[in-house]
């Protein structure tokens, strides 16, 4: 059999039934799958496990160090192999930053249809991932590869943090203010790209946001008045805000008019460029989200649950720390960081999420 050439092989996105963090199993389905798992006694040194759907596992090594471990991989969200590798690596490393840690090394996870894609293309994907790891100051120290039907790439990432600086998604406090580090809309841009309806400017914007490492994480974690952090990825802003609410046992309120969107995203959504993952997300948790009674349409709802690939940090901090948090984001180049909501004491029997115009 002749090896595939770069001239004859198909678009990367055409080989994937989903792309980026939109590949995630829908939250409701995942909840059903995990509900039958039998638990066992966990070691006291496991500081963070699966109980609150946090971004990474954390294991206490000693009084000064905690090990952060995470993994993330997905199918192509773009057609350029180098960009695909960059996005996947940035997304995987983000979970360490979201816990307040500093990454130390990574392992590559590679699944490729070797009879469809050329070795040059596959190599470019890996080179893209390596370039991001170099930017983060970490080596790719190994990994695993398989021949798969769809292209899959991602990383296992390990990091370190002081145990007192671990920031969970379950430690928000009533009265906190929520700050979002990146604008929303990556899912919409990816849907337009797959239909070949995304402009060159839109693509450049998409690559810029999805390859920006969430480096403010460990700096924010060192601030006493930053109480909780997570990153907004495949379940959308609503899904990850709801996880923060449930984990903390509090209510979260999102002020929709304050939530930043990437340029042109609303117009693309109105033109029908909405991912199927957005609807699956909403089906999984929409019943637990209180929306405005008026002035909030189906497009707003789709953007609220739009899956973000390599999305921004969502920071829960004391009101007096908001300016300092914004200053950290600005120093790291996150010019569109914005205050998007607040945390309050639980009003009902269950923690929940509400949205206002």
Image (cartoon, rainbow, N blue to C red):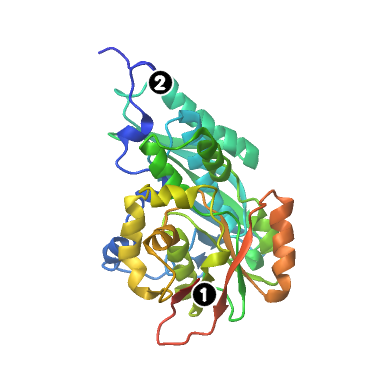
From this viewpoint, is residue 140 visible? yes
The N terminus lies in which quarter of the figure?
top left
Residue found at x 68% / y 75%: 319
Mark 1 crowd level (few <14, some 14–19, many ≥20, 10 Å Cα): many
Mark 2: secondary structure: helix
Specify whether 37 is left or right of 19: left
Using the numbered discs, state the Cα–Cα distance from disc 1 to disc 2 in whole angstroms: 48 Å
**Nearer to us in this view, 127 or 60:** 127
Q: Is residue 193 above or below residue 178?
A: above
Measured as percent of width and height from the top left, residue 205 is found at: 55, 41
**Nearer to us in this view, 22 or 124:** 22
Quarter of the view holding residue 162: bottom right
| Mark in the foreground, 1 or 2 | 1
Among numbered discs 1 and 2, the one appearing first in the sequence: 2
Q: Are marks 1 and 2 in contact (CB under 8 Å)?
A: no
Specify whether 116 is left or right of 309: left
Specify whether 60 is left or right of 76: right
Measured as percent of width and height from the top left, residue 50 is found at: 42, 65
Mark 1: secondary structure: strand
Mark carried by residue 122: none
Q: Is residue 7 above or below residue 327?
A: above
Q: Which residue is mark 2?
A: 119
Measured as percent of width and height from the top left, residue 223 is found at: 71, 66
**Nearer to us in this view, 216 or 144:** 216
Count of numbered labels shown in the rendering: 2
Measured as percent of width and height from the top left, residue 147 is found at: 31, 31
Q: Which residue is mark 1?
A: 253
Residue found at x 56% / y 45%: 209
């Amino acid at each position: 059999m002749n090896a595939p050439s770069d001239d004859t092989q198909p678009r990367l996105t055409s080989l994937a039934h989903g792309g980026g963090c939109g590949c995630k199993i829908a939250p409701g389905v995942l909840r059903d799958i995990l509900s039958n798992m039998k638990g066992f006694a966990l070691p006291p040194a496991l500081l963070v496990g699966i109980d609150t759907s946090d971004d990474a596992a954390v294991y206490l090594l000693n009084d000064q160090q905690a090990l952060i471990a995470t993994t993330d991989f997905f199918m192509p969200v773009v057609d350029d192999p180098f960009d695909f590798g960059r996005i996947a690596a940035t997304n995987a490393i983000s979970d360490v930053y979201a816990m307040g840690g500093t990454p130390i090394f990574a392992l590559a996870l590679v699944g490729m249809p070797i009879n469809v894609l050329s070795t040059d293309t596959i190599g470019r994907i890996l080179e893209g991932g390596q370039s991001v790891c170099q930017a983060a100051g970490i080596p790719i120290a190994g990994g695993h590869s398989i021949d798969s039907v769809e292209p899959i790439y991602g990383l296992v990432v390990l990091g370190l943090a002081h145990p007192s600086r671990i920031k969970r998604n379950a430690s928000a406090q009533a009265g906190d203010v929520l700050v979002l580090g990146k604008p929303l809309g990556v899912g919409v841009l990816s849907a337009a790209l797959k239909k070949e309806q995304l402009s060159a400017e839109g693509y450049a914007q998409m690559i810029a946001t999805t390859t920006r490492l969430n480096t403010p994480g460990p700096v924010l974690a060192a601030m006493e008045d930053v109480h909780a952090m997570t990153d907004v990825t495949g379940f959308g802003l609503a899904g990850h805000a709801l996880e923060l609410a449930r984990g903390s046992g509090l209510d979260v309120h999102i002020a929709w008019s304050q939530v930043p969107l990437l340029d042109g995203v609303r117009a693309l959504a109105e033109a029908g460029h909405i991912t199927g993952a957005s609807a699956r997300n909403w089906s999984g948790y929409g019943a637990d989200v209180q929306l405005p009674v008026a002035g909030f349409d189906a497009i707003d709802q789709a953007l609220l649950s739009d899956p973000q690939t390599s999305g921004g940090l969502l920071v829960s901090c004391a009101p007096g720390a908001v300016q300092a948090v914004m200053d950290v984001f600005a120093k790291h180049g996150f010019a569109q960081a914005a205050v998007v909501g607040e945390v309050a004491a639980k009003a009902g029997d269950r923690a929940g999420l509400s949205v206002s115009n």
